Each structure stands twice: as structure tokens, then as C-alpha cells.
Image: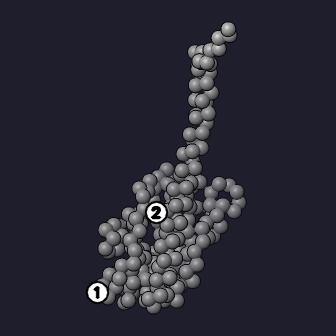
Amino acid sequence: MIKIHTGLTLLELVITLFVLSILVGISVPEFKTMIERKKGGLIIRKLASAIELAKSSAIASNHIVTICRSVDGAKCGGKWQDGLILFTDINGNRLIDDDDELIRRVTFFTINGELKWRAFQNRQYLQITPLGFTRYQNGNFTYCPADKNPKFATQLIINRTGRIRLARDSNGDGVKENSKGQGINCQ
């Protein structure tokens, strides 16, 4: 009768663990890179969705809609990474008055970086008219990771007509370009 052994020898187990540790060591940095790229993209897409909601709300209500940074979800203030609010702003004063209505509060999961809005005249709000255009504003939202690595930075560009687009890496250097064709700078 032939006896078959179905176990692993110590040498086979050590070789298997060695190969597995090499594969894990190679894949972990790539996995972290992928997560950083996706994080910035998710934040920017969430902003794009909020801007599209503001445009459709402004058109539907026939009133100005304001988007501003908000810590508490009730008034404008704080940093963009704290969150933002969208509300009808009938008199355009960037305050939620008696006749205004809060449309949505947008919060972000823990942002391990910085989100900035740069606009004409450095206004830290965005207003959408009943025609769906910005109220004489154009600018961009830029997400930069905590380590300021421009390869993981991303940007949402908004023009005066309310059209939004994502920054792309058109020259293949790994850094997305802004509206002027220059690489996004996180410094």
C-alpha cells in the first residue's frame, strides 16, 4: 500500500512565505498611490455634483443659489474641506435669510489635504444665477494632498457660463494642468 503525505515541509512553507512577502512589498506602495489618486477624484466629483445641483436649483427656483464653505451647515465660514452649503439666496447677500432655503449640506470624509477655491476677486463663495451661469465669477477648486505632491492634486475648473470641467494631464508628465495649461501647484 502506498502512503501519500499531504502536508507541507518547512522548506516549502518558508519559500511560499518569502515569495508572498515580496509580492506584498511590491504591491503596497502602488495600492497607496491608487488610494491617493482616487481620494482627490472623489472630492472633486462631489464638488461637481454640488455645483450641478446648484445650477438646476437656481433655474428651477428662479433665484440665485449660493455655494459657500461651512463648518456647521447653517452659515458660511470655515475652510472648504470642512464642508459646504448650497442655499437659495433671494437677495444675493450670501446669508440664509428668512425667505432663503437650505438646499443641501455637503460634507467630505476626512480630507488629509487641502481644498481651495480661487476665483475672480478672491470671493470665497460661488453664486449661480437663475440662468444657470455663475454670477460674474470663474475660478477653480483645487485639491492638494497633505504631502503637497502635485501628482495627486486635482482640479475642477468653472467658467462664467457655469460650465465645469476636470483638469487633465495632457502632456503625460503625471501632473494635471490648470486652465492655463500649467501644472497644478500645491506649494
Vertical relation: 145 (above or below) 9? below
Instruction: Report the residue at 52% width, 89% height from top.
Output: 131
Tally of numbered tags: 2
Q: Residues within 10 Å of mark 1 (few under 14, many from 20)?
A: few
Residue 142 in sight in this render: no
Vertical relation: 102 (above or below) 115? below
Q: Amino acid at mark 2?
A: Leu
Q: Secondary structure at mark 2?
A: strand
Q: Quick one: quadrant of the N terminus? A: top right
Q: Amino acid at mark 1?
A: Asp
Q: Secondary structure at mark 1?
A: loop
- Assess whether mark 1 and mark 2 are in contact (beta carbons under 8 angstroms): no
Residue 180 in sight in this render: yes
Q: Quadrant of residue 125?
A: bottom left
Q: Which residue is mark 1?
A: 98
Give the camera-side residue of 50 and 115. 50
Task: Pinpoint residue 104: horizontal percent, then vertical percent.
Answer: 40, 74
Instruction: Report the residue at 52% width, 77% height from top.
Output: 52
For residue 47, which numbered disc appears in the image?
none
**Mark 2 or mark 1: which comes first in sequence?**
1
Vertical relation: 87 (above or below) 112? below
In this view, the residue farthest toward the left is: 98
Instruction: Report the residue at 56% width, 65% height from top.
Output: 155
Q: Which residue is mark 2?
A: 115
